[in-house]
């Protein structure tokens, strides 16, 4: 892919019907649960991107047998009943936060010794609460770089070698305390590996934040695989004897990716339908559709997907919204905010400063480059509408920055995306699809 992507301004409102890849978040959760299941699991609708490929390769490096049919978007994982085939080894998680957190938890409660390596970007991301919890369970961790960050050499706490005898679990429940203010992936990681604890697991949440949309995804998926995670009085618990059992599981389309096309409809007065996205799905980013509805869009559930029809240019309303529970869409809202008829305020998203990039800074930096007035706050931004001027968008090697800010160029000349290849992380052919769609509207 070229080092830059020049967004093409649309001459007329689009009428798009699109398919997007499977959800990365659901794909990587499903891969882990399949690996911990008793027997083979067929996963359908798998997202094949950098993040999922790192996860798959790590499972293979740990000795799990996989059958990959990429063209069919299918993967079969041969589960080993909560055990890891290789007791020593090395894995590389790239920049995938889910792979880094989920696989570190799995290896940290196992009976083996492993090296976990990561990209420079992932090495900067927070891991301390996860490491502290593993240490409290009895794991041993040697830092191979900066303390409390990847890469590490980890010797597991040995919970994964306590197997069930005569169909019953042995031992008492393991207990840990966990702060999830920086990332709910820490909690999802321990919930997902709970079946490795023969006596069950209790997780006491010490942070003010105790729940979230991605945690609810984790719990619903676990239930689909036959394991229930209860939540009461700030504590999550999984009963003794939990076992993942599932022959086949279908992964939903990535709603995070779908929202870029919905955002395009919102600012152009056009129509965008994303196939196979439905109300009642697992993903919290469906809440972005409610935001678009409040801003003046018409949101319709059709037989084969959800469609958004934007208002005529000038009819998109300003809004103030707490996006803590669907913060991946803060960038999308920020990119379409210049075309609203009143200021847009986004609040309660301080945690996105510690994702693939400091996303609040990325919002402010790029909007100001485009001549848009934007006030940066510790936990959000306030954006004053205006016509963006030509500029180059600095992506900070963050796929969501690249995809979100491409929208701004659909109504402004001269918007150029730097390093568009960073989208390989979750949506490798995003810009090829955007090219194809915009070609019909020029």
Image (cartoon, rainbow, N blue to C red):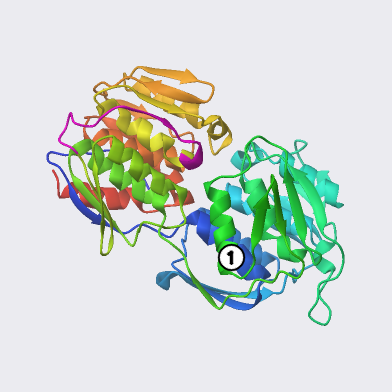
Task: Name the quadrant containing residue 419.
Answer: top left
Vertical relation: 372 (above or below) 411 = above
> What residue appears at the point 14 percent right and 46 percent down from the top-left corner?
441
Side of 134 where 281 appears, left or right: left
Q: What element does badge 1 sit on?
A: helix
> What residue appears at the point 48 percent right and 26 percent down from the top-left corner?
380
Q: Return the x and y of residue 239 as percentages of the image width and height.
A: 74, 64
Q: Is residue 393 magenta?
A: no
Query: Along the line of sight, which residue is nearer the eye, 59 or 178?
Result: 178
Look at mark 1 in the image and give the residue it sits on.
223
Query: Along the line of sight, which residue is nearer the eye, 41 or 57?
Result: 41
Vertical relation: 165 (above or below) 440 = below
Q: Return the x and y of residue 370 as percentages of the image width and height.
A: 32, 22
Side of 289 where 296 appears, left or right: left
Q: Is residue 324 magenta?
A: yes
What residue span does the magenta drawing correspond to? Answer: 311-326
Task: Name the quadrant containing residue 166.
Answer: bottom right
Q: How many marks?
A: 1
């Amino acid at each position: 892919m070229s080092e830059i992507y020049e967004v093409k301004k649309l001459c007329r409102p689009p009428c798009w019907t699109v398919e997007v890849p499977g959800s990365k978040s659901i794909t990587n959760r499903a891969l882990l649960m399949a690996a911990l299941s008793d027997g083979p699991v067929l996963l359908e609708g798998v997202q094949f991107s950098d993040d999922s490929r790192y996860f798959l390769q790590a499972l293979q490096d740990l000795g799990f047998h996989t059958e990959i049919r990429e063209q069919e978007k299918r993967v079969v994982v041969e589960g080993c009943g909560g055990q890891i085939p290789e007791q020593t080894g090395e894995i590389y998680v790239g920049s995938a936060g889910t792979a880094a957190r989920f696989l570190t938890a799995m290896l940290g409660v196992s009976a083996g010794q492993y090296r976990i390596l990561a990209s420079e970007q992932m090495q900067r991301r927070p891991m301390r609460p996860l490491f502290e919890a593993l240490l409290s369970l009895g794991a041993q961790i040697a830092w191979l770089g900066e303390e409390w960050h990847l890469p590490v050499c980890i010797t597991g706490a040995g919970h994964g070698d306590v197997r069930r005898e005569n169909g019953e679990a042995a031992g008492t429940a393991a207990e840990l305390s966990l702060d999830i203010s920086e990332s709910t992936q820490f909690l999802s990681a321990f919930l997902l590996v709970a079946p490795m604890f023969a006596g069950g697991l209790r997780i006491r949440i010490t942070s003010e934040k105790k729940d979230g949309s991605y945690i609810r995804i984790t719990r619903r998926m676990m239930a689909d695989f036959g394991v229930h995670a209860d939540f009461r009085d700030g504590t999550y618990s999984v009963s003794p004897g939990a076992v993942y059992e599932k022959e086949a599981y279908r992964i939903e389309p990535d709603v995070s990716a779908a929202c870029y096309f919905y955002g395009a409809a919102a600012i152009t007065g056009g129509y965008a339908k994303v196939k196979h996205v439905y109300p009642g799905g697992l993903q919290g980013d469906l809440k972005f559709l409610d935001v678009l509805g409040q801003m003046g869009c018409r949101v319709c559930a059709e037989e084969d997907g959800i469609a958004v029809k934007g208002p005529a240019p000038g009819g998109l309303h300003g809004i103030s919204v707490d996006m803590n529970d669907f913060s991946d869409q803060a960038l999308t809202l920020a990119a379409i905010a210049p075309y609203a008829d009143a200021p847009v305020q986004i609040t309660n998203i301080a945690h996105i400063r510690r994702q693939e990039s400091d996303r609040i800074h990325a919002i402010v930096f790029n909007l100001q480059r485009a001549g848009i007035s934007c006030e940066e706050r510790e936990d959000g931004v306030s954006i004053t509408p205006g016509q963006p001027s030509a500029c180059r968008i600095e992506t900070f090697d963050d796929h969501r920055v690249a995809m979100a800010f491409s929208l701004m160029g659909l109504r402004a000349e001269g918007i150029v995306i730097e390093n568009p290849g960073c989208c390989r992380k979750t949506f490798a052919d995003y810009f090829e699809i955007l090219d194809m769609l915009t070609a019909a509207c020029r």
